[in-house]
Amino acid sequence: MAEHSSVPLADEVALESLRIERGKRVSQLPWWFLAMILIAVWTGYTIYTRDNYQEAFGRIYSGLTITITTSLIAYSIALVLGLLAGLGRISRNIMLNNLSKLYIELVRGIPMLVLIFFIALVGVPIVVDGINGLGKWFDGHGLTALGAILTSMQNQAISMNVRAIIALAVTYGAFLAEIFRAGIQSIGRGQMEAARSLGMGYGQAMRYVILPQAIRNVLPALGNDFVAMVKDSSLVSVLAVRDITQLARLYAGSTFRFREAYVTLSVLYLTMTVALSIVVQFVERRLRQDD
C-alpha cells in the first residue's frame, strides 16, 4: 500500500516544483521592457497613421544626424580627457594631481547647463584670444608664418555645433576621469609590482598591464555614461544647435502642436537610449561569461 501511495505523491511534488519554476520565470520576465516596447509600437503606429504626427516626425527626424554626431565626437574627446585626468588623479606628481583634482571638482560643482553656456560663450572666446595673443608674440619674434596662422583664428568662425561638442566633452571628461581612476585603483598593486620586476617602466606597465584590465572592468560604466550623454546632448539646443530637441521646439513654437512635437521627440530619445542600453547589457553579460 505504501508503494502505491508514493507514486501520486511524487507526481504532486513534481507538479508543484514545476509550478514554482514557472512562477519564477514569469516574475523574472522584463515586464518593464515589454511595456516600453508596447508604448513605442503604439506611438509608432500613431505617427504612421496620423498626418499631424507624420509632419512632426518629418520635421524633427532630420536633426537626428546632429544629435548622434555630436554625442559620438564629444564622447570620444571626453574619453581622452577622462583618461588623462584619471591618470593625473593617481599621479604622484603634485602639479598633475592637483590640476586634475581642480578640473574634476570645478566641473562636478557646476550645473551642466551653466557649464555649457560658460564654455561655449566665455571659455571658447578666451581661448581664441589667447591663441591670437600667442600669434602676435610669434610675430614679434620673427616667426611670421606661424604667427599669421594663429592670429587669423576668429571667434565668429567657430560654429555653435563645435562649441557644443567642446562643452559636452569637457563636462563628461570630468565624470569619466573618476571612472578611470576607480578602474585603475581596482587592479591589485601586485600587478604593477610584477610588471616592474620584469623590467617595465611605469608607463609601460600602465599601458600594457594595468590599463587593459582597468578598461575591461569599467567598460559597462563607460557605456552607461555614453547613454547618459546621448540624453544630455539635448541641452545643446540652448545654443541653437539644430538637433532633434531644437527642431521639436521650433516646430512646436511655429505650429502650437506641442503634443505631436514632444511625443515624437520623447520616442526618438527613448528608442536610442533603450537600444544603447541593450548593447551595454549584452557587452556586460559577455564580460561576465568570459570571467
Image (spheres, rainbow, N blue to C red):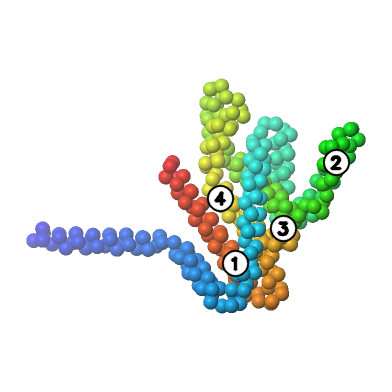
Q: Is residue 264 in view?
A: yes
**Amino acid carrying mark 3 in the image:** Leu
**Does 258 sit left or right of 7 as displayed?**
right
Report which quarter residue 111 is drawn in.
Answer: bottom right
Look at mark 1 in the image and give the residue it sits on: 266
Q: Which mark is residue 113?
A: 3
Look at mark 4 in the image and give the residue it sits on: 223
Within 10 Å of disc 2 (Cα), the crowding (few <14, some 14-19, many 20+) is some
Look at mark 2 in the image and give the residue it sits on: 148
Q: What element carries label 3?
A: helix
**Does 132 sit left or right of 42 as displayed?**
right
Q: Are marks 3 and 1 in contact (CB under 8 Å)?
A: no
Measured Cα–Cα span from mark 4 to mark 2: 42 Å
Q: What element carries label 1?
A: helix
Q: Which residue is drawn at 62% across and 61% down?
A: 64
Location of the C terminus (image quadrant): top left
**Label 2 vs 1, first from the N-terminus:** 2
Above or below, 76 against 252 in this view is above
Q: Do the residues labelled 4 and 1 touch (CB within 8 Å)?
A: no
Measured Cα–Cα span from mark 3 to mark 2: 35 Å
Task: Give residue 287's position: percent from left, percent from top.
Answer: 46, 44
Q: Is residue 262 in view?
A: no
**Label 4 vs 3, first from the N-terminus:** 3
Q: Are marks 4 and 3 in contact (CB under 8 Å)?
A: no
Q: Is mark 4 on a helix, strand or loop?
A: helix
Q: Which of marks 2 and 1 is in front?
A: 2
**Amino acid carrying mark 4 in the image:** Gly
Q: Nearer the viewer, mark 3 or mark 1?
A: 1
Q: Which residue is drawn at 57% across and 29% down?
A: 205
